[in-house]
Image (cartoon, helix red, strand yellow):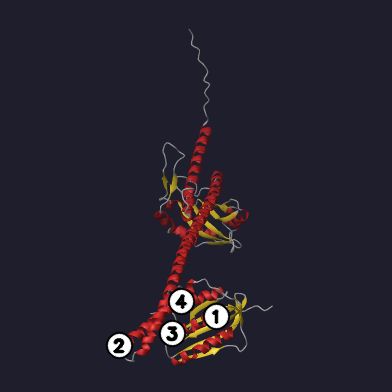
Amino acid sequence: MRRIRMPDTTTKESPATVSKGLQAQKDLQLFYLFSTTLLSTMQLNKLLHLILSTLVCEENSLFCRAMLFLYNQKTNTLQGMLGICRKSTDGLQLVDADPSNPLSGYWDLDEEAMASQRQSDFCTTVRETRIDLAEGCQIVSHVVDERRLYRVEDAQCVKCQKCDFISRFGINSFAAVPLVTRNNLVGIIIVDNPFKNQPITDQQLQILQLFANQAGMAIENTRLYRDIEEAHAELRDARQRLIHGAHLAAIGEMAASISHELKTPLITIGGFAARLGRMLPENTSQRHCLDTIISESHRLERLLGDILTFSRKPTICYQECDLAEIVRSCLADYALALEERNIRLKSVIPSGPCIVLGDSSQLKQVCINLIVNAQEAVGKDGSLDVVLSTAEERGKTCAIVSFSDSGGGIPEDVITKIFTPFFTTKRHGTGLGLAIVNRIIQNHDGVLKVNNVAAGAEFRVILPLASRV
């Protein structure tokens, strides 16, 4: 029986078709690695290193060098930030790759590898490069203005005299692609192949464009993540401040209650001690003990009074007050005390009224506290200058009262803390005097400033003048 040979119906693919299929598979694997790598970190600095490293690493064989320039819209310039060449990508490692699955893994860089890239001569040259888009490379300017990829052959730029960009980096031909996030230009990436002197192919340009689009989105995601982290940190700090404020409020209420309960028996103790003191002769040990009891009870009374004043919610009776008259009255009350300490008082107060809107009793308390504070700082044999003037401050016409003493000034490490409640450098101070003064001034829409002058310190009370209709 004769055997019949059946025709072969299987089709054999041509070498060109097989090559295209392998190239498509390779491109797919490359795009997968690009995507997973760009999503592997939320650190902007590391992301920029990964973007350039994946473009020039040996495994991809795309380009030999990559440069990143960030765009400054205000100055219309590009500032070099990072430059990586192929020999600087030794630290780029493929992580979590499955040999049986081509679509797996991602590239990663450690801190040591990134530090090595930043310290390279090429990166240093890039960071020292600044391109003025108004006067520099016109091709790069087109990339920025039109926000599209450009490929530049050597014939176009090698004879250009407008910038030294080509000669600086020894470029023959290059491609520049913009990094865009939400229609905002972040910068541009410039790639070239100077070592192998190979032209940039159309396929490489397509890969570069697709990669730049993904890189722009990755940068935007990183920035959004950073903004969320900062907002979360601010919310966390605000919550801690609210909790701390609630604790302080509770402590303040308790302190006010205790101070109120202690003040009455202290006054009684001081009163009885004073009566006993009048019955005892001078220069006796018993009289000395009673004098100590009297002075300490008075000091505790002042401390409790300051605590009550600071802890209570202030009530301000706003009305027109003559600040000049308030200052004159306070200086007259303390003129004798200053004279006894041999403190020279010099005051410059206009003869006319200086009308502000506020509570006259609280403003008088401000002046008294600042006079007493200056008196204690000077001690003896010094000076106190008080000047009342008007000037423009914060867009308003304001009254300014300055208290300048010759007490030697305030140390720089202390001057920022003097308005903090309970902070004091005095042996028997409460640390509430200046805090109370500062709060009163703030409640009057004013400002209390302090600075050191030649001989001592100067406190300036700035209050807006009352507007007259």
- Disc with the residue nearer the chain's start (1 vs 4): 4
Residue 434 drawn at (x, y percent): 48, 77
Q: Which residue is mark 2?
A: 285
Q: Mark 1 Cα within 10 Å, few/some/many (few <14, many 20+)?
A: few
Cα distance in 3D space between marks 2 and 1: 41 Å
- Disc with the residue nearer the chain's start (2 vs 1): 2
- Disc with the residue nearer the chain's start (4 vs 2): 2
What mark, if any, has residue 174 been given in the picture? none
Q: Which residue is mark 1?
A: 361
| Badge 3 element | helix
The nearer-to-camera label among 3 and 4 is 4
Is mark 4 in CB contact (under 8 Å) with mark 2? no
Q: Which residue is mark 3?
A: 376
Callout 3 amino acid: Glu
The answer to whether 334 is drawn above or below residue 433 in the figure is below
Is mark 3 in CB contact (under 8 Å) with mark 4? no
Cα distance in 3D space between marks 4 and 2: 32 Å
What mark, if any, has residue 306 been given in the picture? 4
Callout 2 amino acid: Ser
